[in-house]
Image (cartoon, rainbow, N blue to C red):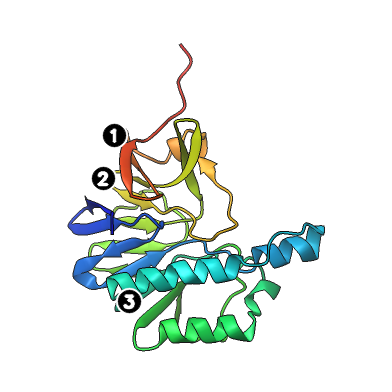
Amino acid sequence: MNGFNFHLGEAGLTALPSGALWWASEGCLTVSDLHLGRSERYARRAGALLPPYEVDETLARLDSDIAATGARTVICLGDTFDDLQAAELAETHTLWLARLMAGRRWVWIEGNHDPGPVDLGGEHRAELVMGPLTFRHIVAEGAVGEVSGHYHPKARIAGQARRCFLVDTRRLILPAYGTYTGGLYSDDPALSDLMQPGAIAILTGQAARPMPMPRRKEPA
């Protein structure tokens, strides 16, 4: 899978090139910030016309990751939908999700964009504790063993922006999984101040590759 293996506390995890997180011992696949329906929302609110295929592309990637891992549990870390109307998926997409959900545990974590409970089945949680890890949408002060999303982290390498995981000894922040999602560079104070010295960025792409987390330079 060209993933990168690492530990957060006692949990052995794998960052996948797609931006998904795989916890093999628990059969658990985690994704964050799918923002399904973003192209439709842009058209509806701003008149911006984007190719209307982002839901298909995002679900196809999720379908592929589930098939490759054989995940028994899937956790979506919030902001699965871009707004209330975006949660009204086309029938083809609703059926696609229903097929992915069938026969496995599926947990929806609440996010700041999420419309609240939707008629898709599964569990709806503010956060979820599994063994040494706590899954939530956005970081909590003082948390340890925390897996979250929200910030859509990315980093520059060779002049190109790449989505990335950020990880230190306390927490892990996942990249946005959705196709039409922007990002926040890791050297932004909002992220630099959250992560410990020695944190790494794990870049997504053809393979998941680690590098020291790019940070803002302090004034001399």
Three-letter code for the amino acid on which mark 3 is drawn: Thr
- For disc 2, the marked residue is 169
- Asked whether the beta carbons under mark 1 and mark 3 sit within 8 Å of each other, the answer is no
Using the image, tell me which numbered label, if any, was put on residue 25: none
Few, some or many residues within 10 Å of mark 2 (<14, 14–19, 20+): some
- For disc 3, the marked residue is 73
Residue 123: x and y in percent read 43, 81
Along the polypeptide, which appears first: circle 1 or circle 2? Answer: 2
- Asked whether the beta carbons under mark 1 and mark 2 sit within 8 Å of each other, the answer is yes
Question: Is 119 positioned to the left or the right of 203 in the image?
Answer: right
* Separation of marks 1 and 3 at Cα, in angstroms: 31 Å
Mark in the foreground, 3 or 2? 3
Residue furthest to the top: 220
Residue 101: x and y in percent read 42, 83
Q: Secondary structure at mark 3?
A: strand
Using the image, tell me which numbered label, if any, was put on residue 198: 1
- Asked whether the beta carbons under mark 3 and mark 2 sit within 8 Å of each other, the answer is no
Along the polypeptide, which appears first: circle 3 or circle 2? Answer: 3
Decide: is 85 above or below 154.
Answer: below
* Separation of marks 3 and 2 at Cα, in angstroms: 24 Å
Along the polypeptide, which appears first: circle 1 or circle 3? Answer: 3
Residue located 32% across and 76% down the image: 73
Few, some or many residues within 10 Å of mark 1 (<14, 14–19, 20+): few
Of residue 106 and residue 20, the one placed in the foreground of this image is 20
Residue located 57% across and 80% down the image: 93
Three-letter code for the amino acid on which mark 1 is drawn: Gly
Q: Quadrant of residue 129?
A: bottom left
Mark in the foreground, 1 or 3? 3
Decide: is 119 above or below 189.
Answer: below
